[in-house]
Image (cartoon, rainbow, N blue to C red):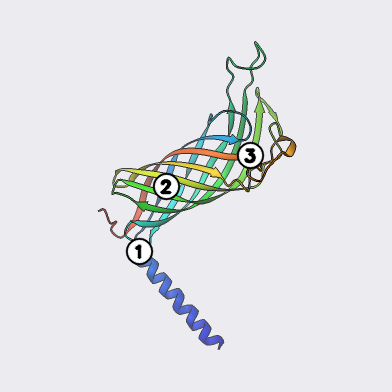
Amino acid sequence: MMRKKLVLLLCLMVTSVGWVRAQQFNGGFLAGISASEISGDYLAGPNKLGIYAGAFANLYIAERSALQMEIDFVQKGSRKIPGANDTIPGATYDYKLVLNYINVPILYRYDWTPFVSVEVGPSIGFLLDSYEMVNGWEEEDIYGGPFNFLDPGIDLGVSLRFLMNWELNIRYSNTFFLSPVRAHAGNAQTFFNRGQLNEVLSFTLHYTLYARGKRWFE
């Protein structure tokens, strides 16, 4: 009985490997900028700019449909730039929150035309480190409590192909509301507002370094 199960498992593995090898597979690198804010810290945004860089791979499951996975380094956070509306006349208030994440999006991608693709899917972020600064001095827990290690979210984006292997990707990412990145100050919450959320608008260039098989639009 055990031998039959092992043979069946081996057959399934061989079949799966053969199916993957038969599909169109692409991989490459991406780099750009992120514009982010923390929803719930009462600061307007997105004013915090950061780095967005990583690698991607996608596997076509139909002529125009693909599953894409990325491993990205993303700088998120929030920023209050001193201005004329500061509450204390003659004083400045420069606030910066930096959150460094490893983000892993898993996206469904659809090629609408040879030049335009849309994407949607979940992502999970792993917090590497964080710090808050006020007027150049590092502070802690200014607008809320400590940050959670995980940042589950939803991503929605569009890619514009301008050369065969080059794309401009514009993506909006938001933390899933049931799992905020940290609690509000004072731990105030409701069912639909449980804490502070990351919001990120990114602009990245994607370069396809490796493509196995001929793509449908070539």
Q: Secondary structure at mark 2?
A: strand
Q: Amino acid at mark 1?
A: Gln
Q: Could you tell which of marks 2 and 1 lies nearer the N-terminus?
A: 1
Residue 162 picture location, percent across and down: 30, 41
Q: Which mark is residue 23?
A: 1
Is residue 35 depicted above or below 102 in this figure? above
Q: CA distance from mark 3 to mark 1?
A: 41 Å
Q: Could you tell which of marks 3 and 1 lies nearer the N-terminus?
A: 1
Is residue 17 depicted above or below 64 in this figure? below
Q: Amino acid at mark 2?
A: Phe
Residue 168 picture location, percent across and down: 37, 41
Residue that lies at the very extreme toward the left in this rendered image: 218
Name the quadrant containing residue 22: bottom left
Q: Which mark is residue 29?
A: 2
Q: Amino acid at mark 3?
A: Gln
Q: CA distance from mark 2 to mark 1?
A: 20 Å
Residue 147 picture location, percent across and down: 67, 42
Residue wearing tag 3: 196
